[in-house]
Image (spheres, rainbow, N blue to C red):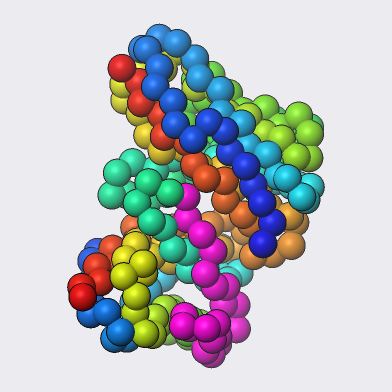
């Protein structure tokens, strides 16, 4: 399968600071990238869908100004958690789609801890 | 509303066979996925079913019945490394993935 690299794998930050998470498709061009959040023992929750060169589409209840998504190229999308708070501590996962139905690959995930 | 149901937890013995069921009610259907997720890691793709029937892939098989809104993941010759959460997800008419809560599979020696 194709490779999606997500960086960093884990990060600890102070409350009030911002954290940027990168998601790269290494050997294919991702027409669409998805950002998910997963709390312990819960299912994946879609946060937003982003297409290259256009604004991300956020799911209901997800704050656009807090979770900034940039999809500047067909191989890179970034999620910035601004003014992070302890309740933002979670596992964030990106997924990159090739455009063919059923074909999407996940990054390794980023465990964010806000202290 | 859209709904995916799967058991919360299952226990099986090394070397045995286990079947994890998934039932769904969604707005449209464009395929059903099974993913494996080890603790602290991102999900990895196991299977994709869009037509009725059984898809076999090594020790893992996945079955789909669209008329019943039902799928199962069958794991044979269980190994300790198969201890993980197994996520069922359905792609709806808008090509959005609707996720189940996952089934935690515990393998005992």
Along the viewing direction, whichever of B4 and B67 lies nearer the viewer: B4
Please tell me in which quadrant of the rendered image residue A40 appears.
Answer: top left
Apparent side of residue B40 relative to residue A1 in the rendered image (left or right): left
- What is the number of callouts on the image? 0
**Residue A26 drawn at (x, y percent):** 73, 45
Q: Residue at x 64, y 56 (%)?
A: A104
**Residue A47 drawn at (x, y percent):** 50, 38
Magenta: main secondary structure equals strand
The magenta stretch spans residue A2:
no
The magenta stretch spans residue B55:
yes
Up/down of B47 relative to A25, above or below: below
Would residue A49 be visible to someone looking at this image? no
Apparent side of residue A29 relative to residue B11 in the rendered image (left or right): right
Q: Residue at x 32, y 66 (%)?
A: B83
**Residue B37 drawn at (x, y percent):** 41, 58
Up/down of A82 relative to B5, above or below: above
Apparent side of residue B77 relative to residue B109 in the rendered image (left or right): right
Q: Residue at x 24, y 68 (%)?
A: B106
**Residue B56 drawn at (x, y percent):** 54, 86
* Quadrant holding the C terminus of chain B: bottom left
Would residue B52 be visible to someone looking at this image? yes
* Quadrant holding the N terminus of chain B: bottom left
Q: Residue at x 39, y 81 (%)?
A: B75
Residue numbers of the magenta segment: B42-61
């Amino acid at each position: 399968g194709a490779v999606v690299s997500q960086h960093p794998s884990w990060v600890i930050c102070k409350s009030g600071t911002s954290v940027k998470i990168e998601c790269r498709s290494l050997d294919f061009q991702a027409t669409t990238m998805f950002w998910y959040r997963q709390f312990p023992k819960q299912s994946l929750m879609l946060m937003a869908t982003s297409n290259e060169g256009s604004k991300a589409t956020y799911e209901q209840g997800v704050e656009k100004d807090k979770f900034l998504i940039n999809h500047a190229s067909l191989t890179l999308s970034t999620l910035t958690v601004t003014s992070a708070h302890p309740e933002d501590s979670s596992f964030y996962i990106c997924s990159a789609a090739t455009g063919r139905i059923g074909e999407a690959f996940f990054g390794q995930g980023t465990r964010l801890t806000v202290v | 509303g859209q709904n995916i149901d799967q058991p919360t937890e299952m226990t099986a013995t090394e070397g045995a066979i286990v079947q994890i069921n998934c039932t769904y009610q969604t707005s449209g259907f464009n395929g059903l996925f099974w993913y494996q997720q080890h603790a602290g890691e991102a999900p990895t793709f196991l299977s994709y079913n869009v037509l009725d029937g059984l898809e076999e892939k090594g020790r893992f098989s996945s079955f789909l019945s669209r008329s019943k809104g039902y799928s199962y993941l069958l794991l044979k010759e269980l190994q300790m490394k198969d201890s993980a959460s197994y996520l069922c997800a359905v792609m709806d008419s808008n090509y959005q993935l609707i996720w189940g809560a996952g089934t935690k599979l515990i393998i005992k020696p």
